[in-house]
Amino acid sequence: MHQPFNYPDYPYRRSPELTEGPTRRYPVVIVGAGPVGLTAALDFAMRGQPVVVLDDNNTVSVGSRAVCYAKRPLEIWDRLGCGQWLADKGVNWKIGKVFFREGLIYSFDLLPQPGHKMPAMINLQQYYLEHTLVEHCTARPEVDLRWKHKVVGLAQQDDHVRLTLDTPDGRFDLLADWVIACDGAGSAVRGMVGADFAGQVFQDRFLIADVVMKAGFPPERWFWFDPPFHRGQSVLLHKQCDDVWRIDFQLGRDADPELEKQPERVIPRLRAMLGQDTEFELEWVSVYQFACRRIDQFRHGRVVFAGDSAHQVSPFGARGANTGVQDADNLAWKLKLVIDGAAPPALIDSYAEERTFAADDNLLNSTRATDFITPKSKASLLFRNAVLELAQDHAFARVLINSGRLSTPTPYVHSRLNTPDEDEFRGVMAPGTPCADAPVLRSDAAPGWLLNALGDDFVLLCFGEPPPHAALAHGAVSARLLSVGDHPGADLRDPEGLLEQRFDGRRGTVYLIRPDQHVAARWRAFDAAKIRAALARCLAA
Amino acid sequence: MALILTPNIPDPDGFYAELIDSQRDLDEPQAAMMNARLVLLLANHVGDRTVLREALAAARPKSRD
Protein backbone atom coordinates (compact mmCIF):
# COMPACT_ATOMS: atom_id res chain seq x y z
CA MET A 1 0.00 0.00 0.00
CA HIS A 2 1.01 3.61 -0.59
CA GLN A 3 2.83 5.37 2.26
CA PRO A 4 2.89 9.16 1.96
CA PHE A 5 3.84 9.43 5.62
CA ASN A 6 7.13 8.14 7.03
CA TYR A 7 6.33 6.43 10.29
CA PRO A 8 8.95 7.41 12.84
CA ASP A 9 10.77 4.79 14.91
CA TYR A 10 11.01 6.38 18.31
CA PRO A 11 14.03 5.21 20.29
CA TYR A 12 13.41 2.60 22.95
CA ARG A 13 15.60 3.25 25.98
CA ARG A 14 16.35 0.79 28.73
CA SER A 15 14.70 2.09 31.91
CA PRO A 16 17.13 2.91 34.76
CA GLU A 17 15.11 0.67 37.10
CA LEU A 18 16.42 -2.40 35.25
CA THR A 19 19.99 -1.67 36.27
CA GLU A 20 19.65 0.36 39.45
CA GLY A 21 17.35 -0.61 42.28
CA PRO A 22 15.37 0.21 44.33
CA THR A 23 11.85 0.65 42.95
CA ARG A 24 11.22 4.28 42.08
CA ARG A 25 8.13 6.30 42.81
CA TYR A 26 6.74 8.94 40.41
CA PRO A 27 3.98 11.50 40.98
CA VAL A 28 2.18 10.96 37.63
CA VAL A 29 2.38 8.05 35.20
CA ILE A 30 0.38 8.25 31.96
CA VAL A 31 -0.36 4.98 30.18
CA GLY A 32 -0.72 5.41 26.41
CA ALA A 33 1.03 7.89 24.09
CA GLY A 34 -1.97 8.58 21.85
CA PRO A 35 -3.61 11.98 21.34
CA VAL A 36 -5.10 12.04 24.85
CA GLY A 37 -2.07 10.78 26.80
CA LEU A 38 0.32 13.08 24.93
CA THR A 39 -1.97 16.08 25.39
CA ALA A 40 -2.19 15.36 29.12
CA ALA A 41 1.62 14.96 29.30
CA LEU A 42 2.16 18.29 27.58
CA ASP A 43 -0.38 20.01 29.83
CA PHE A 44 1.39 18.69 32.96
CA ALA A 45 4.75 19.74 31.51
CA MET A 46 3.51 23.28 30.89
CA ARG A 47 2.47 23.35 34.55
CA GLY A 48 5.96 22.24 35.60
CA GLN A 49 4.80 18.78 36.66
CA PRO A 50 7.13 15.87 35.76
CA VAL A 51 5.33 12.91 34.16
CA VAL A 52 6.28 9.46 32.94
CA VAL A 53 4.51 8.36 29.74
CA LEU A 54 4.43 4.65 28.88
CA ASP A 55 3.54 3.23 25.49
CA ASP A 56 3.66 -0.39 24.37
CA ASN A 57 4.67 0.64 20.83
CA ASN A 58 7.32 2.97 19.44
CA THR A 59 5.62 4.86 16.64
CA VAL A 60 2.55 6.97 15.99
CA SER A 61 -0.93 5.78 15.04
CA VAL A 62 -0.75 3.51 11.99
CA GLY A 63 -3.42 4.59 9.53
CA SER A 64 -5.18 7.88 9.90
CA ARG A 65 -7.93 6.79 12.36
CA ALA A 66 -9.19 10.04 13.89
CA VAL A 67 -9.72 12.62 11.16
CA CYS A 68 -11.72 15.67 12.29
CA TYR A 69 -10.59 18.05 15.02
CA ALA A 70 -12.98 20.66 16.29
CA LYS A 71 -12.34 24.19 17.47
CA ARG A 72 -12.23 23.52 21.22
CA PRO A 73 -9.51 20.81 21.03
CA LEU A 74 -7.56 23.07 18.65
CA GLU A 75 -7.81 25.83 21.27
CA ILE A 76 -6.49 23.42 23.91
CA TRP A 77 -3.56 22.46 21.67
CA ASP A 78 -3.00 26.16 21.00
CA ARG A 79 -2.71 26.73 24.75
CA LEU A 80 -0.11 23.94 24.73
CA GLY A 81 1.80 25.48 21.81
CA CYS A 82 0.85 23.31 18.83
CA GLY A 83 -2.61 24.51 17.76
CA GLN A 84 -1.46 26.85 15.03
CA TRP A 85 0.68 24.18 13.35
CA LEU A 86 -2.28 21.79 13.34
CA ALA A 87 -4.66 24.44 12.01
CA ASP A 88 -2.20 25.32 9.24
CA LYS A 89 -1.43 21.71 8.32
CA GLY A 90 -5.02 20.45 8.42
CA VAL A 91 -7.70 20.79 5.79
CA ASN A 92 -10.04 23.60 6.75
CA TRP A 93 -13.59 22.75 5.70
CA LYS A 94 -17.04 24.22 6.22
CA ILE A 95 -19.44 22.60 3.77
CA GLY A 96 -21.21 19.29 4.25
CA LYS A 97 -23.47 17.66 1.65
CA VAL A 98 -26.01 14.89 2.07
CA PHE A 99 -27.01 12.72 -0.89
CA PHE A 100 -29.88 10.24 -1.06
CA ARG A 101 -29.95 7.71 -3.90
CA GLU A 102 -29.13 9.64 -7.12
CA GLY A 103 -29.37 13.20 -5.87
CA LEU A 104 -28.11 15.89 -3.54
CA ILE A 105 -30.79 16.62 -0.98
CA TYR A 106 -29.22 18.97 1.46
CA SER A 107 -26.04 20.89 2.10
CA PHE A 108 -24.93 22.68 5.25
CA ASP A 109 -22.32 25.28 6.08
CA LEU A 110 -20.66 25.16 9.49
CA LEU A 111 -20.76 28.97 9.20
CA PRO A 112 -17.87 29.55 11.52
CA GLN A 113 -18.32 32.75 13.49
CA PRO A 114 -15.58 35.22 12.54
CA GLY A 115 -13.24 36.53 15.22
CA HIS A 116 -11.89 33.22 16.58
CA LYS A 117 -8.23 32.25 16.29
CA MET A 118 -8.98 28.59 15.57
CA PRO A 119 -11.19 27.30 12.72
CA ALA A 120 -14.48 25.46 13.35
CA MET A 121 -13.12 22.12 12.13
CA ILE A 122 -10.04 20.74 10.45
CA ASN A 123 -9.28 17.34 8.99
CA LEU A 124 -5.89 15.83 9.65
CA GLN A 125 -4.52 12.31 9.86
CA GLN A 126 -4.01 11.14 13.44
CA TYR A 127 -0.34 10.34 12.75
CA TYR A 128 0.39 14.02 12.09
CA LEU A 129 -1.30 14.99 15.33
CA GLU A 130 0.61 12.40 17.34
CA HIS A 131 3.87 13.23 15.60
CA THR A 132 3.70 16.89 16.55
CA LEU A 133 2.57 16.09 20.10
CA VAL A 134 5.54 13.72 20.49
CA GLU A 135 7.90 16.44 19.22
CA HIS A 136 6.53 18.92 21.73
CA CYS A 137 6.71 16.37 24.58
CA THR A 138 10.26 15.39 23.66
CA ALA A 139 11.31 19.04 23.89
CA ARG A 140 10.08 19.24 27.50
CA PRO A 141 12.39 18.08 30.29
CA GLU A 142 9.34 17.27 32.47
CA VAL A 143 8.19 14.48 30.09
CA ASP A 144 9.86 11.09 30.46
CA LEU A 145 8.53 9.27 27.39
CA ARG A 146 9.22 5.52 27.47
CA TRP A 147 8.48 3.53 24.31
CA LYS A 148 7.94 -0.25 24.31
CA HIS A 149 6.92 -0.26 27.95
CA LYS A 150 3.78 -2.34 28.32
CA VAL A 151 1.77 -2.38 31.54
CA VAL A 152 1.22 -6.02 32.48
CA GLY A 153 0.33 -5.70 36.15
CA LEU A 154 -1.34 -3.18 38.44
CA ALA A 155 -1.92 -3.18 42.19
CA GLN A 156 -3.71 -0.37 44.03
CA GLN A 157 -2.16 0.63 47.35
CA ASP A 158 -3.55 3.18 49.83
CA ASP A 159 -1.88 6.22 48.34
CA HIS A 160 -0.20 4.92 45.20
CA VAL A 161 -0.26 2.28 42.47
CA ARG A 162 2.32 -0.40 41.73
CA LEU A 163 2.72 -1.00 37.99
CA THR A 164 4.53 -3.95 36.47
CA LEU A 165 6.03 -3.18 33.07
CA ASP A 166 7.22 -5.46 30.32
CA THR A 167 10.07 -4.13 28.13
CA PRO A 168 12.46 -5.60 25.54
CA ASP A 169 15.01 -5.86 28.41
CA GLY A 170 12.71 -7.55 30.87
CA ARG A 171 10.20 -6.69 33.54
CA PHE A 172 10.30 -4.20 36.38
CA ASP A 173 7.95 -2.45 38.79
CA LEU A 174 7.43 1.22 39.40
CA LEU A 175 5.23 3.10 41.83
CA ALA A 176 2.94 5.97 40.84
CA ASP A 177 1.07 8.39 43.08
CA TRP A 178 -1.42 8.76 40.23
CA VAL A 179 -1.93 6.74 37.06
CA ILE A 180 -3.78 8.27 34.11
CA ALA A 181 -5.05 5.53 31.83
CA CYS A 182 -5.16 6.83 28.24
CA ASP A 183 -4.73 3.40 26.70
CA GLY A 184 -7.70 3.48 24.37
CA ALA A 185 -11.00 1.66 23.90
CA GLY A 186 -9.39 -1.72 24.57
CA SER A 187 -7.73 -0.36 27.75
CA ALA A 188 -5.72 -3.03 29.55
CA VAL A 189 -5.59 -0.84 32.66
CA ARG A 190 -9.40 -0.77 32.74
CA GLY A 191 -9.39 -4.55 32.87
CA MET A 192 -6.74 -4.56 35.61
CA VAL A 193 -8.81 -2.36 37.94
CA GLY A 194 -11.88 -4.49 37.23
CA ALA A 195 -13.94 -1.59 35.87
CA ASP A 196 -17.16 -2.21 33.98
CA PHE A 197 -17.44 -0.84 30.42
CA ALA A 198 -21.08 -1.12 29.45
CA GLY A 199 -23.14 0.18 26.55
CA GLN A 200 -24.38 -0.65 23.11
CA VAL A 201 -22.44 -2.46 20.38
CA PHE A 202 -23.76 -1.86 16.87
CA GLN A 203 -23.99 -4.88 14.61
CA ASP A 204 -23.28 -3.14 11.32
CA ARG A 205 -19.74 -3.40 10.00
CA PHE A 206 -18.00 -0.50 8.27
CA LEU A 207 -15.07 -0.44 5.86
CA ILE A 208 -12.74 2.51 6.41
CA ALA A 209 -10.38 3.19 3.53
CA ASP A 210 -7.83 5.98 3.29
CA VAL A 211 -7.12 6.56 -0.36
CA VAL A 212 -4.44 8.70 -2.02
CA MET A 213 -5.72 10.40 -5.15
CA LYS A 214 -5.54 13.64 -7.07
CA ALA A 215 -9.28 14.02 -7.36
CA GLY A 216 -11.27 17.09 -8.18
CA PHE A 217 -13.62 16.73 -5.21
CA PRO A 218 -13.82 19.87 -3.07
CA PRO A 219 -12.73 19.79 0.60
CA GLU A 220 -16.26 19.05 1.84
CA ARG A 221 -17.91 16.33 3.88
CA TRP A 222 -20.07 14.23 1.55
CA PHE A 223 -22.45 11.68 3.00
CA TRP A 224 -24.55 9.33 0.88
CA PHE A 225 -27.57 7.32 1.95
CA ASP A 226 -28.30 4.42 -0.40
CA PRO A 227 -26.16 5.66 -3.31
CA PRO A 228 -26.26 3.97 -6.75
CA PHE A 229 -22.65 2.75 -6.29
CA HIS A 230 -23.35 1.12 -2.91
CA ARG A 231 -27.02 0.20 -2.73
CA GLY A 232 -28.82 0.05 0.57
CA GLN A 233 -25.88 1.34 2.64
CA SER A 234 -24.26 4.63 3.54
CA VAL A 235 -20.93 6.11 2.39
CA LEU A 236 -18.84 9.02 3.69
CA LEU A 237 -16.12 10.91 1.79
CA HIS A 238 -13.86 13.38 3.53
CA LYS A 239 -10.58 15.09 2.57
CA GLN A 240 -7.42 14.91 4.67
CA CYS A 241 -4.09 16.55 3.88
CA ASP A 242 -1.49 15.31 1.31
CA ASP A 243 -4.28 14.21 -1.10
CA VAL A 244 -5.45 11.51 1.29
CA TRP A 245 -9.21 10.93 1.35
CA ARG A 246 -11.19 9.10 4.00
CA ILE A 247 -13.90 6.87 2.57
CA ASP A 248 -16.21 5.00 4.85
CA PHE A 249 -18.55 2.27 3.52
CA GLN A 250 -21.31 0.76 5.59
CA LEU A 251 -21.22 -2.99 4.89
CA GLY A 252 -24.21 -4.27 6.81
CA ARG A 253 -24.41 -6.91 9.53
CA ASP A 254 -23.37 -10.01 7.66
CA ALA A 255 -20.11 -8.74 6.14
CA ASP A 256 -16.97 -10.82 6.74
CA PRO A 257 -14.37 -8.40 8.16
CA GLU A 258 -11.31 -10.37 6.98
CA LEU A 259 -12.66 -10.79 3.44
CA GLU A 260 -13.78 -7.17 3.13
CA LYS A 261 -10.31 -5.88 4.02
CA GLN A 262 -8.73 -7.55 0.98
CA PRO A 263 -7.70 -5.11 -1.78
CA GLU A 264 -9.50 -7.25 -4.38
CA ARG A 265 -12.75 -6.52 -2.50
CA VAL A 266 -11.98 -2.90 -1.62
CA ILE A 267 -10.77 -1.69 -5.02
CA PRO A 268 -13.95 -2.57 -6.98
CA ARG A 269 -16.04 -0.73 -4.37
CA LEU A 270 -13.84 2.34 -4.76
CA ARG A 271 -13.91 2.10 -8.59
CA ALA A 272 -17.71 2.00 -8.52
CA MET A 273 -17.73 5.12 -6.38
CA LEU A 274 -14.90 7.15 -7.88
CA GLY A 275 -15.34 6.16 -11.53
CA GLN A 276 -13.28 3.71 -13.53
CA ASP A 277 -10.80 6.37 -14.66
CA THR A 278 -9.86 7.88 -11.30
CA GLU A 279 -6.38 6.82 -10.25
CA PHE A 280 -5.94 6.10 -6.58
CA GLU A 281 -3.83 4.09 -4.17
CA LEU A 282 -4.87 2.57 -0.86
CA GLU A 283 -3.07 3.94 2.17
CA TRP A 284 -4.91 2.14 4.95
CA VAL A 285 -7.91 -0.16 5.23
CA SER A 286 -9.78 -1.32 8.27
CA VAL A 287 -13.13 -3.00 8.96
CA TYR A 288 -14.87 -2.35 12.21
CA GLN A 289 -17.98 -2.31 14.31
CA PHE A 290 -18.94 0.64 16.45
CA ALA A 291 -19.80 0.73 20.09
CA CYS A 292 -21.17 3.42 22.38
CA ARG A 293 -20.13 2.63 25.95
CA ARG A 294 -18.74 4.23 29.08
CA ILE A 295 -16.72 3.17 32.08
CA ASP A 296 -18.61 2.90 35.38
CA GLN A 297 -16.43 5.50 37.16
CA PHE A 298 -13.72 7.75 35.70
CA ARG A 299 -11.63 7.30 38.85
CA HIS A 300 -10.77 3.98 40.46
CA GLY A 301 -8.65 4.74 43.53
CA ARG A 302 -5.44 6.29 42.24
CA VAL A 303 -6.17 5.41 38.61
CA VAL A 304 -7.96 8.04 36.52
CA PHE A 305 -9.34 7.23 33.05
CA ALA A 306 -9.33 9.67 30.12
CA GLY A 307 -10.26 9.37 26.45
CA ASP A 308 -11.45 6.15 24.79
CA SER A 309 -10.47 4.08 27.84
CA ALA A 310 -13.34 5.88 29.61
CA HIS A 311 -15.84 6.29 26.79
CA GLN A 312 -16.17 4.88 23.31
CA VAL A 313 -18.36 6.48 20.65
CA SER A 314 -19.16 5.83 17.00
CA PRO A 315 -17.16 8.03 14.60
CA PHE A 316 -20.19 9.97 13.31
CA GLY A 317 -19.71 13.44 14.76
CA ALA A 318 -15.98 13.22 15.44
CA ARG A 319 -16.55 12.83 19.16
CA GLY A 320 -13.79 10.39 20.09
CA ALA A 321 -10.45 12.19 20.07
CA ASN A 322 -12.13 15.57 20.42
CA THR A 323 -13.77 14.70 23.70
CA GLY A 324 -10.74 12.76 24.96
CA VAL A 325 -8.55 15.84 24.60
CA GLN A 326 -11.10 17.78 26.63
CA ASP A 327 -10.77 15.12 29.35
CA ALA A 328 -7.04 15.85 29.50
CA ASP A 329 -7.72 19.60 29.57
CA ASN A 330 -10.07 19.14 32.51
CA LEU A 331 -7.83 16.80 34.48
CA ALA A 332 -4.32 18.28 34.25
CA TRP A 333 -4.82 21.49 36.26
CA LYS A 334 -6.89 19.74 38.90
CA LEU A 335 -4.45 16.91 39.47
CA LYS A 336 -1.55 19.35 39.54
CA LEU A 337 -3.23 21.39 42.33
CA VAL A 338 -3.99 18.22 44.28
CA ILE A 339 -0.40 16.96 43.90
CA ASP A 340 0.86 20.36 45.12
CA GLY A 341 -1.43 20.20 48.13
CA ALA A 342 -3.19 23.37 46.97
CA ALA A 343 -6.57 21.64 46.58
CA PRO A 344 -8.22 18.62 48.22
CA PRO A 345 -8.59 15.29 46.35
CA ALA A 346 -12.29 16.15 45.96
CA LEU A 347 -11.19 18.30 43.02
CA ILE A 348 -10.44 15.05 41.14
CA ASP A 349 -14.02 13.95 41.76
CA SER A 350 -15.18 17.07 39.94
CA TYR A 351 -13.17 15.80 36.95
CA ALA A 352 -15.15 12.58 37.03
CA GLU A 353 -18.46 14.44 37.37
CA GLU A 354 -17.83 17.00 34.65
CA ARG A 355 -16.40 14.57 32.13
CA THR A 356 -19.02 11.89 32.82
CA PHE A 357 -21.63 14.53 32.03
CA ALA A 358 -19.78 15.36 28.78
CA ALA A 359 -19.31 11.66 27.91
CA ASP A 360 -23.02 10.98 28.35
CA ASP A 361 -23.85 13.92 26.08
CA ASN A 362 -21.44 12.56 23.45
CA LEU A 363 -22.80 9.04 23.80
CA LEU A 364 -26.36 10.28 23.34
CA ASN A 365 -25.45 12.20 20.18
CA SER A 366 -23.35 9.38 18.83
CA THR A 367 -26.00 6.72 19.48
CA ARG A 368 -28.71 8.82 17.81
CA ALA A 369 -26.55 9.37 14.71
CA THR A 370 -25.71 5.67 14.49
CA ASP A 371 -29.39 4.77 14.81
CA PHE A 372 -30.25 7.13 11.94
CA ILE A 373 -27.44 5.83 9.71
CA THR A 374 -28.03 2.15 10.48
CA PRO A 375 -31.77 1.64 11.11
CA LYS A 376 -32.41 -1.46 13.20
CA SER A 377 -35.85 -2.43 11.87
CA LYS A 378 -38.02 -2.13 8.74
CA ALA A 379 -40.12 0.52 10.47
CA SER A 380 -37.11 2.68 11.39
CA LEU A 381 -35.70 2.30 7.87
CA LEU A 382 -39.06 3.47 6.49
CA PHE A 383 -39.05 6.58 8.69
CA ARG A 384 -35.40 7.25 7.89
CA ASN A 385 -36.09 7.12 4.14
CA ALA A 386 -39.26 9.18 4.56
CA VAL A 387 -37.18 11.89 6.27
CA LEU A 388 -34.65 11.81 3.42
CA GLU A 389 -37.40 12.00 0.76
CA LEU A 390 -39.18 14.87 2.48
CA ALA A 391 -35.89 16.74 2.99
CA GLN A 392 -35.58 17.25 -0.75
CA ASP A 393 -38.56 19.62 -0.68
CA HIS A 394 -39.11 20.69 2.92
CA ALA A 395 -36.81 22.44 5.35
CA PHE A 396 -38.42 20.84 8.41
CA ALA A 397 -37.18 17.38 7.43
CA ARG A 398 -33.58 18.53 6.88
CA VAL A 399 -33.07 19.12 10.59
CA LEU A 400 -34.12 15.50 11.22
CA ILE A 401 -31.32 14.12 9.00
CA ASN A 402 -28.55 12.90 11.28
CA SER A 403 -25.34 11.91 9.52
CA GLY A 404 -23.43 12.82 12.70
CA ARG A 405 -23.80 15.95 14.85
CA LEU A 406 -20.33 17.44 14.86
CA SER A 407 -18.48 17.68 18.14
CA THR A 408 -18.99 20.78 20.25
CA PRO A 409 -17.94 21.12 23.90
CA THR A 410 -20.48 20.17 26.56
CA PRO A 411 -20.75 23.02 29.10
CA TYR A 412 -20.47 21.82 32.72
CA VAL A 413 -23.74 23.49 33.62
CA HIS A 414 -24.32 21.43 36.77
CA SER A 415 -20.76 21.40 38.06
CA ARG A 416 -20.11 21.77 41.77
CA LEU A 417 -17.24 24.12 40.87
CA ASN A 418 -19.62 26.72 39.40
CA THR A 419 -20.87 29.65 41.42
CA PRO A 420 -24.45 30.22 40.23
CA ASP A 421 -25.23 33.64 38.72
CA GLU A 422 -26.71 36.23 41.06
CA ASP A 423 -26.89 38.89 38.38
CA GLU A 424 -28.58 39.06 34.99
CA PHE A 425 -26.49 38.14 31.94
CA ARG A 426 -27.32 37.77 28.27
CA GLY A 427 -25.55 35.30 25.98
CA VAL A 428 -24.05 31.87 26.48
CA MET A 429 -21.03 32.44 28.78
CA ALA A 430 -22.73 30.89 31.81
CA PRO A 431 -20.64 29.25 34.55
CA GLY A 432 -19.29 25.91 33.30
CA THR A 433 -18.94 27.09 29.68
CA PRO A 434 -15.61 27.22 27.81
CA CYS A 435 -14.69 30.83 27.04
CA ALA A 436 -15.39 32.03 23.52
CA ASP A 437 -12.32 33.48 21.84
CA ALA A 438 -12.21 37.08 20.61
CA PRO A 439 -9.63 39.32 18.93
CA VAL A 440 -7.88 41.70 21.34
CA LEU A 441 -5.09 44.26 21.33
CA ARG A 442 -2.46 43.57 23.95
CA SER A 443 -0.94 46.24 26.19
CA ASP A 444 1.94 46.56 23.70
CA ALA A 445 -0.73 47.32 21.05
CA ALA A 446 0.01 44.08 19.19
CA PRO A 447 -3.03 42.13 17.98
CA GLY A 448 -3.74 38.93 19.87
CA TRP A 449 -6.48 36.63 21.07
CA LEU A 450 -8.38 36.38 24.33
CA LEU A 451 -7.67 32.69 24.86
CA ASN A 452 -3.93 33.21 24.46
CA ALA A 453 -4.14 36.01 27.03
CA LEU A 454 -6.06 33.76 29.46
CA GLY A 455 -3.33 31.12 29.34
CA ASP A 456 -3.51 28.25 31.81
CA ASP A 457 -4.10 29.67 35.27
CA PHE A 458 -6.98 31.26 37.18
CA VAL A 459 -7.84 34.65 35.71
CA LEU A 460 -10.06 37.49 36.87
CA LEU A 461 -11.27 39.06 33.65
CA CYS A 462 -12.43 42.59 34.51
CA PHE A 463 -14.31 44.78 32.06
CA GLY A 464 -13.28 48.36 32.82
CA GLU A 465 -10.84 49.57 35.42
CA PRO A 466 -10.55 47.18 38.37
CA PRO A 467 -10.10 48.41 41.95
CA PRO A 468 -6.49 48.70 43.14
CA HIS A 469 -4.91 45.46 44.42
CA ALA A 470 -7.62 43.47 42.68
CA ALA A 471 -5.66 40.20 42.30
CA LEU A 472 -6.99 37.65 44.78
CA ALA A 473 -5.91 34.35 46.25
CA HIS A 474 -7.20 31.34 48.14
CA GLY A 475 -4.35 29.70 49.99
CA ALA A 476 -1.55 29.09 47.52
CA VAL A 477 -3.76 29.67 44.47
CA SER A 478 -4.08 33.15 43.08
CA ALA A 479 -6.17 34.56 40.25
CA ARG A 480 -4.27 36.72 37.78
CA LEU A 481 -5.92 39.99 36.89
CA LEU A 482 -6.67 40.79 33.25
CA SER A 483 -8.51 44.05 32.64
CA VAL A 484 -10.20 44.97 29.38
CA GLY A 485 -10.97 48.51 28.25
CA ASP A 486 -9.53 51.89 27.37
CA HIS A 487 -8.40 52.82 30.90
CA PRO A 488 -4.72 53.46 31.64
CA GLY A 489 -2.92 50.23 32.41
CA ALA A 490 -5.52 48.04 30.65
CA ASP A 491 -4.12 44.59 29.78
CA LEU A 492 -6.38 44.13 26.76
CA ARG A 493 -8.33 46.31 24.40
CA ASP A 494 -11.40 45.11 22.58
CA PRO A 495 -10.94 46.66 19.12
CA GLU A 496 -14.06 45.16 17.51
CA GLY A 497 -16.25 45.06 20.62
CA LEU A 498 -16.54 41.27 20.22
CA LEU A 499 -15.20 40.47 23.68
CA GLU A 500 -17.81 42.70 25.33
CA GLN A 501 -20.49 41.26 23.05
CA ARG A 502 -19.60 37.58 23.62
CA PHE A 503 -19.31 37.94 27.40
CA ASP A 504 -22.07 40.54 27.83
CA GLY A 505 -19.23 42.45 29.45
CA ARG A 506 -20.49 45.91 30.24
CA ARG A 507 -18.27 48.09 32.45
CA GLY A 508 -17.81 46.67 35.94
CA THR A 509 -18.41 43.03 34.94
CA VAL A 510 -15.97 40.49 36.40
CA TYR A 511 -15.46 36.87 35.29
CA LEU A 512 -13.54 34.25 37.26
CA ILE A 513 -12.02 31.87 34.70
CA ARG A 514 -10.59 28.42 35.41
CA PRO A 515 -7.17 27.19 34.29
CA ASP A 516 -8.93 25.20 31.55
CA GLN A 517 -10.49 28.45 30.27
CA HIS A 518 -14.00 27.66 31.50
CA VAL A 519 -16.12 30.25 33.28
CA ALA A 520 -16.33 29.57 37.04
CA ALA A 521 -18.33 32.61 38.16
CA ARG A 522 -19.30 36.14 37.07
CA TRP A 523 -20.67 39.29 38.61
CA ARG A 524 -21.72 42.78 37.60
CA ALA A 525 -19.47 44.37 40.20
CA PHE A 526 -16.16 43.61 41.87
CA ASP A 527 -16.76 42.09 45.31
CA ALA A 528 -13.56 40.63 46.80
CA ALA A 529 -15.37 38.40 49.31
CA LYS A 530 -17.57 36.85 46.64
CA ILE A 531 -14.63 36.32 44.33
CA ARG A 532 -12.60 34.62 47.07
CA ALA A 533 -15.56 32.36 47.89
CA ALA A 534 -15.97 31.45 44.20
CA LEU A 535 -12.26 30.67 43.89
CA ALA A 536 -12.42 28.41 46.96
CA ARG A 537 -15.49 26.69 45.53
CA CYS A 538 -13.68 26.14 42.24
CA LEU A 539 -10.88 24.40 44.15
CA ALA A 540 -13.43 22.12 45.87
CA ALA A 541 -12.04 23.64 49.09
CA MET B 1 -52.22 21.90 25.14
CA ALA B 2 -53.31 18.28 25.31
CA LEU B 3 -53.91 15.77 22.50
CA ILE B 4 -57.45 16.22 21.17
CA LEU B 5 -59.31 12.92 21.40
CA THR B 6 -62.83 14.23 20.82
CA PRO B 7 -64.21 14.75 17.29
CA ASN B 8 -62.28 17.62 15.69
CA ILE B 9 -62.46 16.95 11.91
CA PRO B 10 -65.28 18.59 9.95
CA ASP B 11 -67.17 16.14 7.72
CA PRO B 12 -65.61 12.99 9.21
CA ASP B 13 -67.01 10.66 6.51
CA GLY B 14 -65.63 12.90 3.79
CA PHE B 15 -62.17 12.96 5.43
CA TYR B 16 -62.10 9.21 5.86
CA ALA B 17 -62.98 8.67 2.19
CA GLU B 18 -60.26 11.14 1.20
CA LEU B 19 -57.70 9.29 3.31
CA ILE B 20 -58.56 5.89 1.80
CA ASP B 21 -58.79 7.30 -1.72
CA SER B 22 -55.36 8.89 -1.40
CA GLN B 23 -53.79 5.43 -1.23
CA ARG B 24 -56.15 3.53 -3.54
CA ASP B 25 -53.65 3.14 -6.37
CA LEU B 26 -50.62 2.47 -4.14
CA ASP B 27 -49.08 -0.91 -3.43
CA GLU B 28 -48.19 -1.85 0.14
CA PRO B 29 -44.63 -0.44 0.23
CA GLN B 30 -45.82 2.80 -1.38
CA ALA B 31 -48.66 3.12 1.12
CA ALA B 32 -46.30 2.42 4.03
CA MET B 33 -43.95 5.13 2.77
CA MET B 34 -46.80 7.55 2.35
CA ASN B 35 -47.97 6.85 5.90
CA ALA B 36 -44.48 7.50 7.26
CA ARG B 37 -44.27 10.78 5.35
CA LEU B 38 -47.73 11.71 6.60
CA VAL B 39 -46.73 11.07 10.22
CA LEU B 40 -43.66 13.29 9.83
CA LEU B 41 -45.56 16.09 8.07
CA LEU B 42 -48.32 16.13 10.67
CA ALA B 43 -45.87 15.80 13.57
CA ASN B 44 -43.99 18.86 12.35
CA HIS B 45 -47.27 20.75 11.97
CA VAL B 46 -48.26 19.93 15.58
CA GLY B 47 -44.77 20.67 16.88
CA ASP B 48 -45.77 20.49 20.56
CA ARG B 49 -43.63 17.72 22.11
CA THR B 50 -46.17 17.00 24.86
CA VAL B 51 -48.96 16.48 22.34
CA LEU B 52 -46.70 14.33 20.16
CA ARG B 53 -45.71 12.19 23.16
CA GLU B 54 -49.38 11.70 24.07
CA ALA B 55 -50.17 10.75 20.47
CA LEU B 56 -47.30 8.21 20.39
CA ALA B 57 -48.65 6.64 23.58
CA ALA B 58 -52.27 6.63 22.32
CA ALA B 59 -51.24 5.03 19.01
CA ARG B 60 -49.22 2.16 20.55
CA PRO B 61 -50.87 -1.28 20.52
CA LYS B 62 -52.72 -1.91 23.77
CA SER B 63 -50.82 -4.32 26.01
CA ARG B 64 -52.60 -7.62 26.58
CA ASP B 65 -51.83 -8.06 30.25
Image (cartoon, helix red, strand yellow):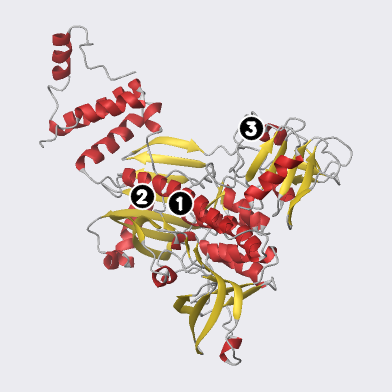
Q: Is residue A310 left or right of residue A271?
A: right
CA gap between label 2 and label 1 equals 26 Å
**Residue A155 versus residue A346 in the image, above or below:** below
Residue A435 visible from this viewpoint: no
- Return the residue nearer the eye: A435 or A394: A435
Q: Judging from the image, what secondary structure is the residue with disc 1 in? A: helix
**Among the 4 quarters of the image, the one containing residue A86:** bottom right
Q: Nearer the viewer, residue A263 or A72?
A: A72
Q: Residues within 10 Å of mark 2 (few under 14, many from 20)?
A: many
Quadrant in the rendering for residue A429: top right
Q: Amino acid at mark 3?
A: Glu
Q: Chain of mark 1?
A: A
Q: Residue A79: x, y in percent?
A: 67, 55
Judging by the rendered image, the residue that carries numbered circle 1 is A359
Where is residue A280? Give x, y as percent: 43, 60
Residues at badges 3 and 2 in contact (C-beta under 8 Å)? no
Q: Is residue A421 above or below residue A282?
A: above
Q: Is residue A294 above or below residue A495?
A: below
Say which quadrant the N terminus of chain A sits in: bottom left
Label 2, on which residue?
Answer: A235
Q: Earlier in the sequence, mark 1 or mark 3?
A: 1
- Closer to the chain start, of discs 2 and 1, is 2
**Residue A422 numbered tag:** 3
Question: Whole-Å distance between the Cαs marked 3 and 2?
Answer: 49 Å
